[in-house]
Image (tube, rainbow, N blue to C red):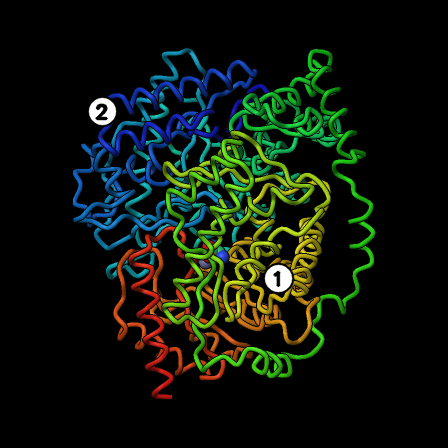
Amino acid sequence: MTHPTPSRAHVLGFPRIGAHRELKFAQEAYWSGAITEASLRDTGSALRQRHWALQQAAGLDLVCVGDFAWYDQVLNTLALLGALPTRFGFETEQLSLADYFVAARGNPQHHAMEMTKWFDTNYHYLVPEWTADSRFDGGVDWLFEELAEAQALAHTPKVTLLGPLSLLYLGKTKGGLGHSLELLHKLIPAYQKVLSRLQQAGVEWLQIDEPILALDLDQQWLNAFLPSYTALAQQAPKLLLSTYFEAVDEHASLIHSLPLDGVHLDLVRAPQQLAAFLENWPQGRVLSAGVIDGRNIWRADLSSLLKQLQPLQQQLGDQLWISSSCSLLHVPVDLAAETSLAPETLSWLAFATQKLDEVVALKLALHGNAEAVLPQFIAAQTAIASRASSARIHNPVVQKRLAEVRSSDAQRQHPFSQRIAAQQQRFALPLFPTTSIGSFPQTALIRQTRAAYKRGAIKHIEYLEAMRAEIRLVVEAQEKIGIDVLVHGEPERNDMVEYFGEQLWGYGFSLNGWVQSYGSRCVKPPFIYGDVYRPEAMTVAWSEYAQSLSDKPMKGMLTGPVTMLQWSFVRDDQPRQTTALQIALALRDEVQDLERAGIGMIQIDEPAFREGLPLKRKDWAAYLDWAVRAFKLSSAGVSDETQIHTHMCYSEFNDILPWIAAMDADVITIETSRSDMELLAGFGDFAYPNDIGPGVYDIHSPRVPRVSEMQNLLQKARSVIPDARLWVNPDCGLKTRAWPETIAALEHMVQAAKLLRASA
Ligand code: GLN
Ligand code: ZN
């Protein structure tokens, strides 16, 4: 069917934000009216050109076109097809950039499209809305313009596009449409038009992404692949079907049967899947081997990858292409700006720009140019050797301690029923105790003071006094409102992971390692490079000070091991669970120090607990088992009278309730107000045994709910949770709120609890 083409080096996509977040700043300037649309477009174009030039200069054979987006790649696909939600009433072929941003961000007339996590990454895409009247009759020409731009610069483009089945699958059906597959017959002709236009424009290769193949897929979705791809292949560039984030070998025969010119597999996440594919690899079909990690920041072990690839190359010859495991969207842009890291640490890392070189080095080495890339191989080998032996990474104290952990260490001394009796004795809390989740408004002044301290612009004592003043304010406010269990407000924390990471050994921080989270929002995850060790107490002084100001219980406040892991780049030289358990041990020491300092309640936040779930259900139990173990290892080293709290944000719990219960926190607070307490139903059905605080108001909005609204929610909660087990608290921390609405809402919350007590 196809003519063999020479082996190629390529990546599945390059980050679009720019090495200095140029796109973010241009987007935000445009939204605020500070720059014109033309100027925003210039920034976009300059970034694309720069990124193509980088790919070309590195020696990639193809540059990616279509990985750019003004906000999100899924939204760009909708714009291309003319498939933005019909509720906006846009003229799809004339869609302006301003309209596009209305869909992404909303305006007074239209609420924004919903946003959700892209598979198991921290990137968020805009969720397509499928309705009976969804249309696909053609959209904007941006992709074709970008293609022309690349061609004019004499690049060899490979266009990347999200495939039709993944696009459909990732959307939500609304407004009377039974199943999104009902739209397939309208969607395929729209893709056909795009594909034949690309072919006419001289595109040789189209990378068509079908990441849903990595999920547990129903038969009806699987059945849709062959007819869809048969229709698409009729008039199209060569099709490289790309999959990533998990193994797709259970679909090997289906994928073999599709009319494709190439298939991309993620061999970092799932190297074992190769065998099933190689058995009867279709003649002439390209295998794009995703061997350079697009999800992590470590320098690749080029020599061992080369050994892995050599037999493959013997089998496939030029049909073997070399690539990143997935788009490089998920890693920072360039190491060049990292001037603060120790040279040794720096040598272990590769950001997107460096990964381009790695892909090319492998391809050249496979094709007999080993000499040309020898220096790169030597540098990689040196880095790998240094990681294997560096004292920065390997801490015998930590390793010995972890090896000696006994299962009893992850078990409280007595069951909940006994503990709660002891705790009630100690704290004598009223029915429906009131509390908050931890943070209080982070005013501009707090942020400035922290920043000034970090810069060295103010002295330690000035910083201490400023933070203590803030803590006093927060404690006084809570006393005045009449809250039962207090918090210190977390003014000293910039971020719930970074704050702890900065104090732990084994954690590193980049200066400029930004990764797009959504739209213009970027995050700079820390990286865990070594055994995690807590050299000294991290929060005790703050909590002790706060407790000294009040007779009411003051909750100590920590970030749990799973969340510490989930929101960082994690080392790849040991299992994730080993790292989680190391963090758990560090936290365990902190928990015990807090207990010794007289802090009777300690909250260990795990908002990312559910996020860590693997893509495939068969892997869930293994993850949940170690995640629960890590939480318990961090929390179980205290006496019965010490009350352990945990907090989780908006997530579905119903399918993982046995594990949530197994965490055995004395109190769990969860976000439920936006779901009208629906999330709580599962806890009732499951007869969740411990105390629970369902959030009674949404902290994402400045709106102050009425007392009666909170009462209603609490009445609903009472219908599923016994009174003795029920707490009263907001959905989450208050750091993004302003003071006036915070006070007003908490006052209402306390009144609602009091009214409830009176009626109970
Ligand atoms: N204790 C944290 C806070 O209140 C919890 C944040 C979170 O759940 N994301 O800010
Ligand atoms: Zn939260």
Q: Nearer the viewer, residue 675 or 456?
A: 456
| Residues at marks 2 and 1 touching, judged by CB atoms closer than 8 Å | no
Name the spot of residue 269 as percent of width and height, x first. Answer: 62, 43
Answer with left or right where residue 528 lies relative to residue 41. right
Q: Quadrant of ligand 2?
A: bottom left
The residue that appears at 78% across and 33% down in the rendered structure is 390
Mark 2 to mark 1: distance in Å?
A: 49 Å
x, y percent for residue 717: 39, 78
Residue at label 1?
A: 624
Q: Which residue is mark 2?
A: 36
Q: Residue at x 37, y 40 (%)?
A: 74
Decide which of tag 2 and tag 1 comes sooner along the chain. Answer: 2
Foreground pick, 151 / 699: 699
SS under mark 1: helix
Is 218 above or below relative to 288? below
User: Image quadrant of residue 49?
Assistant: top left
